Amino acid sequence: MVKDLQKYAAERGIKYFMVSYTDLFGGQRAKLVPAQAINDMAVDGAGFAGFATWLDLTPAHPDMMAVPDASSVIQLPWKKEVAWLASNCVMEGAPVAQAPRNVLRKLVDEAAKEGLRVKTGVEPEFFLLTPEGDKIADPYDNAEKPCYDQQAMMRQYDVIAEVCDYMLELGWEAYQNDHEDATGQYEMNWKYDDALQTADKHSFFKFMMKSVAEKHGLRCTFMPKPFKGLTGSGCHAHISVWSLDGSENAFADSSKELGLSDRGRTFLGGIMKHASALAAICNPTVNSYKRINAPRTSSGATWAPNTVTWTGNNRTHMVRVPGPGRFELRLPDGAANPYLLQAIIIAAGLDGIRSKADPGKRHDIDMYTQGHTITDAPKLPLNLLDALREYDKDSTLKAMMGEEFSAAYMKLKHKEWDSFVSHFSRWEHDNTLDI
């Protein structure tokens, strides 16, 4: 545990700290603080005008202070003189309730009151593009079935290996990297951790991946569906829940179906119960719904759900249980806010435990070819507006996430939707010019 950041800087040759926080839309905001001033910032925080970022604040609000969490400090492996700090947003001495990291911290505390410690791993998918962002960076990456393409992986070896080396250096226990199902698409994996630590690592990973790509003259995007006809970028979350001391997996029970304990089953029940509302957080952009409601892609499958169903080790459903004591939520996409993603999982799961929610019948069919045979499972929202309406109807989930957060998120996301629908598109011109 780092207690004296100035001393930490002196020992490691750090000149500057990036005091960083994540806003409601997943934007990472930071101030660059000289090491000589960091101990004062560690107490009082770095001042921001919250209105200037995606938070529901006005220019008249007092300074919002980003108070760094010293335990989150990461020395930038690609620029050793700089260190990054995740921060908690405070205004006039009180936590800003709508700030995503604060939302997650509150829910981590709620889980702890139940004697539970939520651990998660994320699988962020991304594309490497040309600097303009209009096409994939590797012109030779054009196979019909590009997933796990060995040659394509090696052509981007310098970028992928550099980031993986950094994760190993940071002690994240990175364990595999692969070319994903779309041309130009990749995924990198590191070991699961407590939900807050996973969110901090996820946030830093996106920053690191973009920075290293830019260093190599490329552009990295986590946009859910950057190209029509190609598989979109998901951010699958693997979830398990443990005792507070981390010694016992509360989800594991070898005597139960798929090795999932009764408590684990009710946590899953909460995810299923709130799934349509979860989409507002797990799939937070207009573009997100091009992924979860996509037609068949050029590779033959979207690898994304469109119906609220669960299964065993079968990737065509919204949730799969790949092994005892954990399950994978396949709903989230690359645009998901790292902190709100973890928060919404805990909120839905805790309500499932408290209400003893039943996840319903398990389905083991191929949803891509036989999904039409399931008539009693809800369809996921077709667009962002539908998802926001589902979230707004879910009073339990809104309360779990915090009423101030929920009101702010809904307000800003509705403004985003209004901006989208007021935009004149090429489609309108092509299809209604001669009507």
Image (cartoon, rainbow, N blue to C red):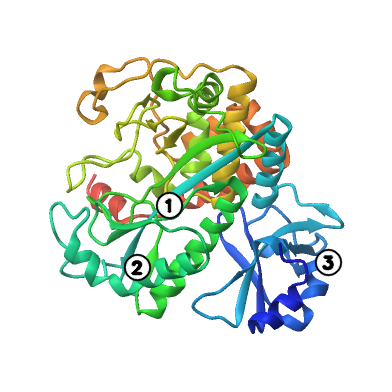
Residue for badge 3? 43
Viewer-closest of 312 and 405? 312
Residue for badge 1? 334
Q: Earlier in the sequence, mark 2 or mark 1?
A: 2
Q: Is residue 299 left or right of residue 342?
A: left
Residue at (54, 44) in percent of width and height: 341
Are discs 1 and 3 less than 8 Å apart at CB?
no
Q: Is residue 369 left or right of residue 29?
A: left
**Where is residue 48, by image quadrant?**
bottom right
Q: Nearer the viewer, mark 2 or mark 1?
A: 2
Q: Earlier in the sequence, mark 1 or mark 3?
A: 3
User: Alpha-carbon distance for marks 2 and 3?
Assistant: 37 Å
Residue for badge 2? 160
> How crowded is the residue under tag 3: few (<14 C-alpha within 10 Å), some, or many (20+)?
few
Expressed as whole percent of the image width and height from the top left, the position of residue 343 reads 60, 41
Residue at (48, 37) in percent of width and height: 279
User: Alpha-carbon distance for marks 1 and 3?
Assistant: 34 Å
Are discs 2 and 3 less than 8 Å apart at CB?
no
Q: Nearer the viewer, mark 1 or mark 3?
A: 3
| Marking on residue 426 | none
Give the vertical position of 232 relative to 136 (above or below).
above
Type of the residue with mark 1: Gly
Residue at (24, 47) in percent of width and height: 431
Give the vertical position of 358 relative to 280 (above or below).
above
Expressed as whole percent of the image width and height from the top left, the position of residue 110 reads 71, 35
Residue at (13, 58) in percent of width and height: 143
Q: Residue furthest left?
A: 144
Type of the residue with mark 3: Val
Expressed as whole percent of the image width and height from the top left, the position of residue 401 reads 66, 37
**Where is residue 20, by image quadrant?**
bottom right
Type of the residue with mark 2: Ile
Viewer-closest of 35 and 270? 35
